[in-house]
Image (tube, rainbow, N blue to C red):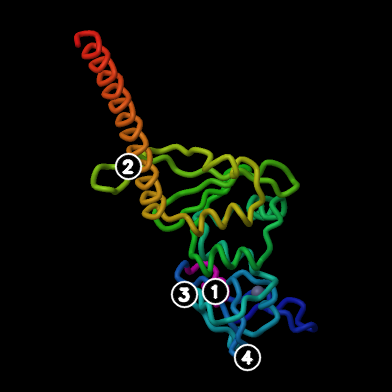
Amino acid sequence: MNKINNSDRGVFLESNWRHRVLSDERVKFLKLITDNSIHDKTCKLLQKYPDRDIICLNEYDEKLSQCRGCAIKAYLRLGAKDPKNYKRYCTFFDNTFLSAKVLREIYVTNKMTTSIFERTLTIKYKEDTWRIISLDNDGNVQLRHNNYKRLTDGTRQFLGGYHIQNNYCKRIKIRPALSVIETYDYKIHSINDSILQTVDKNKHSALKQSAISRFLAWSKSVNNWFKRMLF
Ligand SMILES: [Zn+2]
């Protein structure tokens, strides 16, 4: 049975059903039967609607438009391992100027998973794990990448710990940092590395070759000198 507070304004704040929905971990999102928006299950905007107008969703439906009022909560419910750190996430998003549109790219489009500790956002995307450290309140971040060792069969062994991805990633804005994460492909990275190594190897043998030919030329001239001396 519904417990109606502020009944003159028609605000439904609590009901047994809502309590069950909130504590049921299978239910993650809600939608109204009357429109095509998706809401986090804690969205306050839904409090004014009667239970019969609400549909429970276990999965995030990308085709529905996201309610602006609960976007961050919904995205964190979808992809954060620690959605309870909502306030810390909000501070990080504010300091790095992350918009709801970019958050959608992170959590809905790319299905990245995250966790947060102090000023560091850890992002897992495909095989790799990245750390974005918020350096200040002006949107500057540093991007670090998980350490790994290349094995002879071309696969990788992850070693634990992180390194700064490159000089460019020491101090950048979050959009380019996210682009590095989105476009990183170990196989391409690895092919590029092999090309560089082959170039290096060729350079090395070219140098070796030219040292040998210099020696041969020198011994030929010594030989000629002896011949001239003898005859
Ligand atoms: Zn909402």
Q: Which span of residues is magenta-colored?
A: 16-24
> Quick one: label 4 or label 2, which is nearer the N terminus?
4
Task: Return the x and y of residue 56 as percentages of the image width and height.
Answer: 52, 79
Cα separation, mark 4 vs mark 1, equals: 15 Å
| 215 with respect to 95 (left or right) | left
Asked if ligand 1 lies within 8 A of label 1, the reply is no
- What residue is disc 2 on? 150
> Quick one: label 4 or label 1, which is nearer the N terminus?
1
Task: Return the x and y of residue 166 as percentages of the image width and height.
Answer: 54, 41
Callout 4: 10 Å neighbours few (<14), some, many (20+)?
few
Q: How many marks?
A: 4
Q: Where, by quadrant of the figure, is residue 150 drawn?
A: top left
- What residue is disc 4 on? 34
Give yes or no for contact between labels 2 and 1 (Cβ–Cβ under 8 Å): no
Cα separation, mark 3 vs mark 1, equals: 6 Å
> Quick one: label 3 or label 2, which is nearer the N terminus?
3
- What residue is disc 3 on? 58
Q: Nearer the viewer, mark 2 or mark 1?
A: 2
Q: Name the residue: 57% across, 66% down.
A: 105
- What residue is disc 1 on? 29
Relative to residue 54, is residue 84 depicted above or below? Answer: above
> Quick one: label 3 or label 4, which is nearer the N terminus?
4
Q: Name the residue: 53% across, 51% down.
A: 115
Main SS class of the magenta portion in the image: helix
Q: Can you say which quadrant of the picture contains the N terminus?
A: bottom right
Callout 1: 10 Å neighbours few (<14), some, many (20+)?
many
> Quick one: label 2 or label 1, which is nearer the N terminus?
1
Task: Return the x and y of residue 113 as percentages of the image width and height.
Answer: 49, 58
